[in-house]
Image (tube, rainbow, N blue to C red):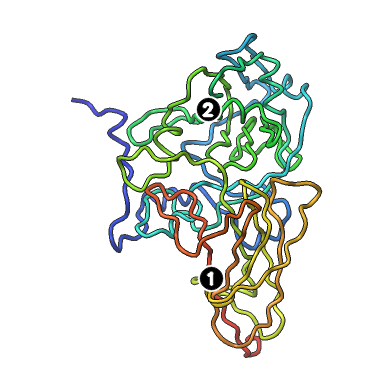
Amino acid sequence: MGERTGDVSSPARLAGPGEGIGADELALATRNHGLPLEALRHDVTPPGLHYVLTHYDIPYVPDAGAWRLTVDGRVRTPLDLSLADLLSFPQVTTRVTLECAGNGRALLTPRPVSQPWLVEAVGTADWTGVPLRLLLAEAGADPAAADVVFTGADHGVERGVEQDYQRALPLVVATGHDPEVLVATAMNGAPLPPQHGRPLRLIVPGWYGMAQVKWLRSVTVSDVPFTGFQQSVAYRIRRTADEPGEPVTRVAPRALLVPPGFPDFMSRTRVVRPGAVRLVGRAWSGQAPVSSVEVSTDGGAHWVPAHLEPVADGHRWAWRRWHHDWAAVPGAYAVGARATDAGGRSQPLDQCWNRGGFGNNAVCWVRVVCVADAHSP
């Protein structure tokens, strides 16, 4: 009997006790990349520093002008749109912080075996495109429909299922004004780079990255809830393998620290000098606006409030800068920050464990050593 497509695909699993990062995870880590945390200083992340997660291959698009986007299903008038057609619609630019749902996965015990993110799977960009609600209105989407399904051009096999990457949103989200979902054509004022979805991608402010379908080629209005792999099998919060789980949707609150001082090459331990050290970072939440940030330099035994800067120019869906002035004295420290949003959600100190490694927004600790010796040549 010949091999089948599913035979090349392994099931989901947890790492065994003491099991290190394997060759398969390392291969994923070299294909995908996170934000160097020092780049949190940028209000808007340069595209090459923005995190990237690609499930399958990056599609080769030699001629973006030849790309087509269809809008079909439960609509009055199906649409078949070129890039030029899309650019004829009103364009909106929204600054949005995107975060991978698996951010923090590699810090969990036991570790779900998958893309081994620490905490760098995040970035913020100015995304320009057509509000999805305008396209759905132009097509005459059935107001009684359940979901809107988005299909990308990336194709692969996952846990034995051959598939195009597909996700769905409830119709009420897809047609909403706040947040306003975009069919994006540009990132930071330039056409989308290949790794970020050239020539079209979805931007869903406040939602984890799995909803932001890249290389978008079709939008289908459905009268029944979508049950595709990425919706009903992957991206579910489960503690046991046999439970249906809860869907992964909006981003949990998180604050990250720009690593202070300078690093040791291998351990990334930070070195600072005694005296005033300004700790700075970013905080965000997709569920409600961030309302406060606190800082600890002793591993969470004590917390002090940080100064949280105002929302910049109405950028509700982007991260906010914070800072705290620390009087450092010689010694070793575990420095971290935690965010709380207006809905009362705050980052936990302990891991948020589930089998997929999703939504782990536990406080991240940075090892900092304050030394008094002079600079060595």
Of residues 106 and 373, which is closer to you in this image? 106
- Residue at 36% across, 48% down: 239
Q: Which quarter of the rendered picture does the C terminus lie within? A: bottom right
Of residues 272 and 101, which is closer to you in this image? 101
Q: Name the residue under label 1.
A: 268
Which residue sits furthest front?
Answer: 344
Q: Is 377 positioned to the left or the right of 154 in the image?
A: right
Q: Whole-percent x and y of residue 14?
A: 32, 51
Q: How would you rate the neighbour count of disc 1 (Cα within 10 Å): few for under 14, some for 14-19, many for 20 or more?
A: few
Indicate the secondary structure of the residue bearing disc 1: loop
Q: Whole-percent x and y of residue 372?
A: 63, 89
- The reply to whether callout 2 and callout 1 are in contact (CB within 8 Å) is no
Q: Residue 263, relative to residue 87: is it above or below? A: below
Tell me which amino acid carries mark 1: Arg
Q: Which of marks 2 and 1 is nearer the N terminus?
A: 2
* Disc ID at residue 153: 2
Q: Whole-percent x and y of residue 259?
A: 62, 68
- Residue at 66% across, 20% down: 136
Task: Measure the alpha-carbon separation of dots 2 and 1.
Answer: 38 Å
Residue 2: quarter of image: top left
- Residue at 53% across, 64% down: 364
Residue 83: quarter of image: top right
Q: Is 42 positioned to the left or the right of 298 in the image?
A: right
Q: Which quarter of the rendered picture does the N terminus lie within? A: top left
Indicate the secondary structure of the residue bearing disc 2: strand
Q: Is 23 positioned to the left or the right of 217 in the image?
A: left
Of residues 264 and 252, which is closer to you in this image? 252
Which residue sits furthest right?
Answer: 313
Residue 211: quarter of image: top right
Tell me which amino acid carries mark 2: Ala
